[in-house]
Image (spheres, rainbow, N blue to C red):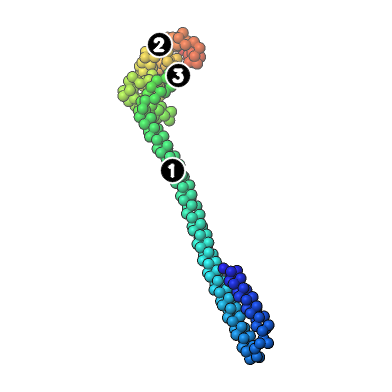
Amino acid sequence: MVRKALRAGGQMLVALALAVGATSASAGLFDDDEARKAILDLRARVDAVRADSDARIAQEGRRLNDENAQLRKGMLDLQNQIETLRAEVAKLRGQDEQLQREVAELQRRQKEMAQGTDDRLRQFEPSKVVVDGVEFVADPAERRDFEAALATFRRGAFPAAQAAFFDFLKRFPQSGYAPTALFWLGNAQYANREYRDAIANFRALLTRAPTHFRAPEALLSIANCQIELKETKAARKTLEDLLKAHPQSEAASAAKERLSHLK
């Protein structure tokens, strides 16, 4: 637009110049006053054209400045919108990462809860145990009570251990722990000097499980009880039975020593 206005103003100035030239050429035909008047009028017209051209140029410049200002404002607004969108995207990304962490934590807790539930359920379910080389299935209550009675014996609390093993055999007579429980009950009774009751429980073990891991020790313990009861003949017979039935056992070595001291 500015260029168009400049072209229009230039064309008009050229036309005026030609008119001035024409006027000069014909100046001889007019007097001085008329010539000066024509020149002044022409100058006024040139000045008017120049002023109009300048005004148009200024107006067009202001319009372009306004458009540039609006364009810059629009670009600034667009940049602000882009920054706002970036901030929102970053916020959403952060929320997504937080959500992922929360989901992972929830899954971990659910897994732990499920594992804890399984563990608690297993506490009430029968499970396989191995005692003195014998594998069997036992209820949690059996295992708990047997281990508690054995721990009491190992602390040296023999009266309490005797009561605990006696109660265990009464409540779980068919338990896989029973032969071992009879053995430790007999030992608790031996420690409490209840020799005849101890012999009865050691014999109960041998009757119930003659090939049990504790059978050689049970025979040796019976002989020890008989020795304490001054039943030397019976003790000798028990020791000889032990050597015959379990010649390679550790109890057999102890039996040989006992026999060498019996009169």
Per the model, the C-alpha gap separating discs 2 and 1 is 75 Å
Point out the tag, 1 or 3, that comes first from the N-terminus. 1
Q: Residue at x 38, y 16 (%)?
A: 205
The residue positioned 43% from the left and 30% from the top of the image is: 155
Q: Is residue 40 left or right of residue 229?
A: right
Q: Which mark is residue 234?
A: 2
Judge left or right: residue 223 versus residue 39.
Answer: left
Q: Quadrant of residue 50?
A: bottom right
Between disc 2 and disc 3, the foreground one is 3
User: For the N terminus, which image quadrant?
Assistant: bottom right
Category of crowding for the residue at label 2, using alpha-carbon neighbours closer than 10 angstroms: few (below 14), some (14–19), many (at least 20): some
Q: In the drawing, does residue 100 fall left or right of residue 6?
A: left
Question: What is the three-letter code of the residue carrying label 3?
Answer: Gly
Q: Secondary structure at mark 2?
A: helix
Mark 2 residue type: Ala
Q: Is residue 26 above or below residue 113?
A: below
Mark on residue 133?
3
Which amino acid is tagged 1?
A: Val
Residue that appears at 55% across and 68% down? 64
Toward the viewer: 64 or 186?
64
* Percent position of residue 260, x then y: 50, 12
Residue wearing tag 1: 103
Q: Quadrant of residue 33?
A: bottom right
Q: Give x and y (percent) for residue 94.
A: 48, 50
